Amino acid sequence: MLNVENTIQTVESEYDELVPSRYAVRIGEIDVLVVSDGVLSLPTATMATNADPADRATWLDEMFLPPDAFGWPLNVLVARSGDQNILIDAGLGVEYPDFPRAGQLPLRLAAAGIDLGSITDIVITHMHMDHVGGLLVDGVKERLRPDLRIHVAAAEVKFWASPDFSHTSMPSPVPNVLRSAARRFLDEYRSQLRVFDQEYEVAPGVVVCRTGGHTPGHSVVRVESGGDRLTFAGDAVFPVGFDHPDWHNGFEHDPEEAVRVRVSLLQELAATGGLLVATHLPFPSVGRVAVDGAAFRWVPVFWEY
Ligand SMILES: [Zn+2]
């Protein structure tokens, strides 16, 4: 007689992908899920605007990365604390034909069994289009709860009323697209915004803290429970930021302040051993930070199954 429990069964999945797009971590009593929104391809020059091109080329070569275009991973977080479901950032959305591999969030949340209507809070680390665009996708707003709270730093809302891009170095069409996405986000969701000055406890153990640097209201999210801690760093850290924390990213509104924010965050994480997740680190982007001479080293977690 056939023993069913020992038989490998073929599972027909409605959602068939070559690689997984979500990774779960438990931080004490808080469930955290990293969900990939996809990948965003940008010129490599954007990730190191103040570096000698030869040094940048060397770094890319040593990382086995192509010289001209770099596929930025795009990660979003979902945290469940008590009876609150908190979405942290929302990915790019689907209206940009130049970025066909991003904007997967609504589909991947559904695949993870997370209904948009179950989200009680959204935290926006900053209002760049790859962080708010997912909320502008047709049909998304209608599925969100009418009493949804969206938390964003007051300085961020103020900045986008009249953004100053004079210290940024972005590919040419990007500033206008950023401006338009931020304006539409504010128009659509203004009545649901809950602004804070420096920090705000969104739910027990989930605190959003303004850092500035990348944008004036850029914020990170601290998750802490039962002695475990995880920081979602938004755009304070990019893949190149461990070896070269002083390299400027072209999207940084105040690149020198962004370096200070990055270095102090990496130093803190190296000292505490807390987990780091960041928007543009390789999925699932869950790891720790070690000090490596004058720079840092990224130490990915061993996946747990
Ligand atoms: Zn970003």
Image (cartoon, rainbow, N blue to C red):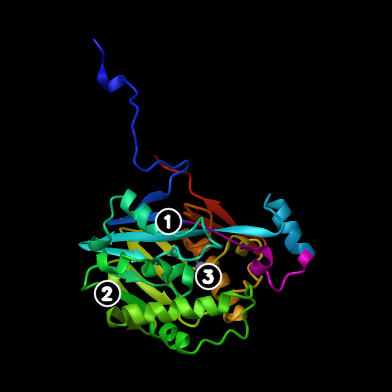
- Residue 286 is one of the magenta-drawn residues: no
- Measure the C-alpha gap from mark 1 to mark 3: 23 Å
Pointer 2: what residue? 149
Any part of residue 229 in sight: no
Residue visible at 21% across and 73% down in the picture = 147
Locate residue 262, reporting x and y percent: 56, 71
Is residue 41 a member of the stretch shown in magenta? yes
User: Badges 3 and 2: C-beta atoms under 8 Å apart?
Assistant: no
Q: Of label 1 and label 3, which has the lower sequence position? A: 1
Q: Earlier in the sequence, mark 2 or mark 1?
A: 1
User: Which residue is under mark 1?
Assistant: 104
User: Element at badge 3?
Assistant: loop
Q: Secondary structure at mark 2?
A: strand
Three-letter residue code for mark 2: Arg
Q: State which region is magenta.
A: 38-53
| Position of residue 76 in the picture relative to residue 41 (left or right) | left
* Residue at the image point whose x is 49% and y is 52% from the top: 283
Amino acid type at circle 1 is Gln
Q: CB of mark 2 within 8 Å of CB of mark 1?
A: no
Q: In this view of the protein, which residue sits in the foreground, 260 or 240?
A: 240
Location of residue 9 in the rendering, given as x and y in whole percent from the top left corner:
33, 25
- Residues packed near mark 1 inside 10 Å, few (<14), some (14 to 19) or many (20 plus): many
In this rendering, which labeled residue sits more in front, label 3 or label 2?
2
Q: CA distance from mark 3 to mark 2?
A: 24 Å
User: In the image, which is nearer the foreground, mark 2 or mark 1?
Assistant: 1
Residue 166 in sight from this viewpoint: yes
* Front in this rendered view, residue 213 or 261: 213
Q: What residue does disc 3 label?
A: 236
Q: Quadrant of residue 132?
A: bottom left
Q: Residue 235: x, y in percent?
A: 51, 69
Question: What SS does tag 1 mark?
Answer: loop
Real-space CA distance between mark 2 and mark 1, rounded to the nearest whole angstrom: 23 Å
